[in-house]
Image: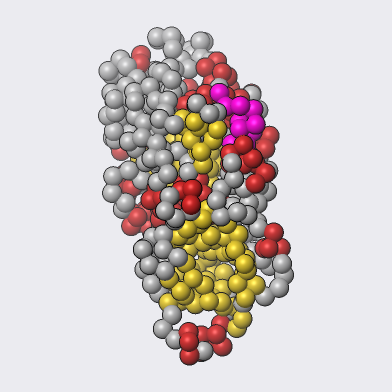
């Protein structure tokens, strides 16, 4: 694997496989892959397979005089925690229409880079919007006809234009069934107090039962197209009045909607297997929100878990607090991106992804879903100009993909920590070495280590009693895979 990324046209063939070839060795060596910042993105080391590190007995290696005083990073794979559902990103109308405009080889390369389990990230856990979101080409709803309480005119014709073709193409490449989370940004205007999809407003109580049926109809319509649905969130960012598609719920309103309408509607339709995710907003208020919903047993019985985003302050401690208070409920990261444009070439953006994933996984999060899978070079299209970053950017002038550092850093997790893995006990004696580890279903142990500092770090790395001396350059990230 070269130290610079391949040209996007050959991305499906040239990006490294999810398990480097050296990882197939059964000798006493630890395969690893490195990304490290250079003067710019083009000169950086990007997801490069390194010479395997020799492994030896941890006690004897630690006793050597030259290793005294080294930082220590230790993994105990026999102590495990939550099961990891997987990683992925969001299918949006913006991503899908941008994908459709790519040349055929680049369109195929994008899907393989994300969904191919042998030569790409192996994504399996994704999100799609029900009705429009800001990353749509404009406002639309699947039930446009006012006062159509029987939903006689409900349809997903809009999604058949771009969204469904992209999802269906990804399904053909993915190695395992995709888990798809459905999230609404707004009910149709006629169901809302402000009479429009944008600028917040609330769901009118008299339409709550009809709105719940829209989830049922959407799930049924997608599954009739061969696209199974894993779960639904109640509302994207229910505490935000946005200038784009949005709808506000208090914690009590969300609780009551789940208890009295959404949960019963799904069960009555034979869709009790559909997971319901509450909150779907920032970490800052997730504790209070979860407490209100989960403290009502009749609402809580329908809820699988709490979804959250990364905007505003980090509040990683809140993720653990929700688990500690409600250990029978799950935690899922459902959206994150860098706002304010595409941020082309930003190394810090990849580091933000890595820091968030490490901290979220270490606090019982079971899956991590990125925002747009693809955007154009402006960070759009977005029907209100809310331009943002994406791990893959398409240059409309050249018709070529521009993989960003965030794509590489996401791969350091998704290609090594596979669906079904269990997080393992892992800690480092130096704060600059941010780390998480997991045991895959095949018994291999994956370790991801992030160094956001401007200093190099040499450390004694021990996995289940086997040790080596590892080193990370400044502003770098490494994934290690100990095969079984």
Left or right for 315, reference 25: left
Left or right for 279, reference 421: left
Q: Quadrant of the C terminus?
A: bottom right
Q: Residue 30 location, x and y as percent? A: 62, 69
Q: Residue 423 location, x and y as percent? A: 52, 61
Q: Residue 459 location, x and y as percent? A: 47, 75
Residue located at (51% from left, 49% from top): 408
**Is residue 51 visible to us here?**
yes
Left or right for 124, reference 318: right
Quadrant of residue 204 within the rendered picture: top left
Which residue is more in the foreground, 320 or 419?
A: 419
Quadrant of residue 440 within the rendered picture: bottom right
Query: Is residue 103 a member of the stretch shown in magenta?
Result: yes
Query: Is residue 192 a member of the stretch shown in magenta?
Result: no
- Figure label count: 0
**Is residue 186 visible to us here?**
no
Range of the magenta residues? 101-110
Q: Quadrant of the N terminus?
A: bottom right
Q: Residue 139 location, x and y as percent? A: 40, 18
Left or right for 248, reference 161: left
Which residue is more in the foreground, 395 or 199?
A: 395
Residue located at (65% from left, 72% from top): 29
The chief SS type of the magenta part is helix
Q: Is residue 194 above or below residue 483?
A: above
**Display coloring:** secondary structure
Residue located at (40% from left, 9% from top): 146
Q: Is residue 87 above or below residue 133?
A: below
Which residue is more in the foreground, 82 or 360?
A: 360
Residue located at (59% from left, 41% from top): 7
Q: Is residue 165 above or below residue 237?
A: above
Which residue is more in the foreground, 333 or 254?
A: 333
């Amino acid at each position: 694997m070269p130290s610079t990324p391949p040209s996007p046209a050959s991305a499906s063939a040239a990006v490294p496989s999810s398990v480097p070839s050296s990882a197939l060795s059964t000798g006493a060596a630890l395969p690893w892959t490195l990304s490290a910042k250079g003067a710019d993105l083009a000169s950086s080391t990007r997801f490069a397979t390194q010479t395997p590190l020799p492994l030896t007995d941890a006690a004897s290696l630690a006793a050597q005089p030259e290793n005294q005083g080294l930082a220590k990073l230790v993994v105990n794979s026999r102590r495990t925690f939550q099961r990891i559902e997987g990683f992925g990103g969001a299918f949006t109308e913006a991503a899908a229409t941008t994908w459709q405009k790519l040349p055929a080889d680049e369109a195929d390369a994008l899907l393989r880079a994300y969904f191919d389990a042998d030569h790409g990230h192996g994504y399996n856990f994704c999100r799609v919007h029900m009705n429009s979101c800001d990353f749509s080409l404009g406002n639309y709803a699947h039930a446009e006809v006012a006062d159509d309480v029987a939903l006689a005119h409900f349809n997903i014709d809009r999604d058949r234009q771009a969204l469904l073709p992209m999802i269906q193409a990804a399904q053909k490449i993915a190695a395992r069934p995709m888990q798809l989370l459905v999230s609404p940004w707004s009910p149709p205007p006629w169901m809302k107090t402000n009479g429009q999809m944008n600028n917040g407003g609330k769901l009118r109580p008299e339409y709550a039962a009809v709105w719940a049926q829209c989830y049922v109809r959407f799930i049924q319509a997608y599954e009739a197209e061969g696209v199974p649905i894993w779960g639904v969130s109640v509302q994207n960012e229910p505490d935000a009045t946005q200038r784009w598609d949005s709808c506000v719920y208090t914690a009590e309103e969300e609780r009551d909607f789940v208890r009295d309408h959404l949960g019963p509607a799904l069960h009555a339709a034979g869709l009790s297997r559909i997971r319901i995710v509450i909150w779907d907003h920032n970490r800052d208020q997730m504790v209070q929100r979860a407490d209100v919903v989960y403290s009502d047993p009749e609402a809580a019985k329908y809820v699988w878990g709490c979804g959250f985003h990364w905007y505003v302050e980090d509040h990683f401690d809140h993720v653990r607090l929700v688990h500690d208070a409600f250990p029978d409920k799950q935690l899922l990261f459902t959206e994150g991106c860098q706002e304010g444009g595409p941020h082309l070439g930003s190394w810090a953006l990849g580091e933000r992804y890595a820091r968030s994933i490490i901290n979220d996984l270490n606090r019982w999060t079971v899956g991590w879903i990125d925002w747009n899978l693809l955007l154009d070079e402006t960070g759009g299209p977005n029907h209100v100009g809310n331009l943002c970053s994406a791990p893959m950017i398409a240059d409309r002038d050249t018709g070529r993909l521009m993989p960003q550092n965030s794509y590489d850093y996401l791969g350091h997790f998704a290609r090594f920590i596979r669906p079904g893995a269990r997080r393992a006990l892992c800690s480092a004696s130096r704060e600059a070495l941010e780390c998480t580890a997991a045991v895959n279903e095949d018994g291999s142990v994956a370790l991801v280590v992030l160094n956001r500092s401007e200093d190099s770090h040499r450390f004694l790395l021990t996995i289940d009693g086997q040790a080596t001396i590892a080193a990370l350059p400044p502003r770098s990230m490494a994934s290690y895979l100990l095969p079984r």
